[in-house]
C-alpha cells in the first residue's frame, strides 16, 4: 500500500488531472519500466487506476 504524496511540480501543474488523489492511500498493481522516462506505477486509488511516478509515492505497508 502506498500514500500518494505527489510532488511540487505535479501538484501545481495546470493540467493536473487528479487533484483529489494526493494524501490518499492506494495499492500498486503494476510497475511500468520505460527506459526513456522515470519509473511509473499503476495504482488503484479512489476506485480507479492511475499512473504515478515512483517519487510521488510513499510506501506505508509492504509484504514480502
Image (spheres, rainbow, N blue to C red):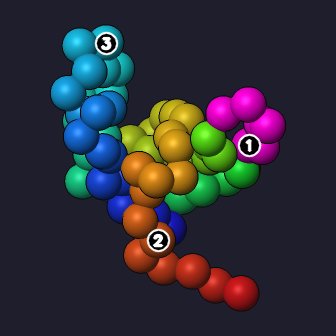
Q: Secondary structure at mark 2?
A: strand
Q: Which residue is at the front of the view, 31 or 50?
A: 31
Q: Are marks 2 and 3 in contact (CB under 8 Å)?
A: no
Alpha-carbon span between mark 1 and mark 3: 22 Å
- Name which residue lies at 73% across and 31% down: 36
Q: Which residue is at the front of the view, 47 or 51?
A: 51
Q: Is residue 8 magenta?
A: no
Horizontal side of residue 32 vs 46, given as left or right: right
| Percent of width and height locating residue 37 | 66, 33
- Name which residue lies at 46% across and 71% down: 59
| Percent of width and height locating residue 39 | 65, 45
Extent of the magenta region: 32-37
User: In the displayed structure, would residue 35 be above or below residue 5?
Assistant: above
- Name which residue lies at 30% across and 45% down: 7
Point out the tag, 1 or 3, that comes first from the N-terminus. 3
Point out the tag, 2 or 1, that comes first from the N-terminus. 1
Mark 2 sits on what residue?
Answer: 59
Alpha-carbon span between mark 2 and mark 3: 26 Å
Using a 10 Å C-alpha cutoff, classify the residue at mark 1 as few (fewer than 14 neighbours), some (14 to 19) or many (20 or more).
Answer: some
Point out the tag, 2 or 3, that comes first from the N-terminus. 3
Assign the magenta stretch its main secondary structure. Answer: loop
Q: Secondary structure at mark 1?
A: strand
Mark 3 sits on what residue?
Answer: 15
Q: Which residue is at the front of the view, 59 or 14?
A: 14
Mark 1 sits on what residue?
Answer: 32
User: In the displayed structure, would residue 62 be above or below residue 46?
Assistant: below
Q: Secondary structure at mark 3?
A: loop
Is residue 49 at least partly visible in the picture? no
Horizontal side of residue 31 vs 52, given as left or right: right
- Name which residue lies at 79% across and 37% down: 35
| Percent of width and height locating residue 13 | 26, 21
Amino acid at each position: 500500500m502506498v500514500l500518494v504524496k505527489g510532488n511540487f511540480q505535479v501538484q501545481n501543474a495546470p493540467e493536473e488531472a487528479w487533484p483529489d488523489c494526493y494524501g490518499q492511500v492506494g495499492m500498486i498493481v503494476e510497475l511500468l519500466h520505460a527506459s526513456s522516462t522515470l519509473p511509473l506505477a499503476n495504482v488503484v486509488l479512489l476506485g480507479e487506476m492511475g499512473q504515478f511516478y515512483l517519487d510521488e509515492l510513499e510506501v506505508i505497508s509492504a509484504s514480502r
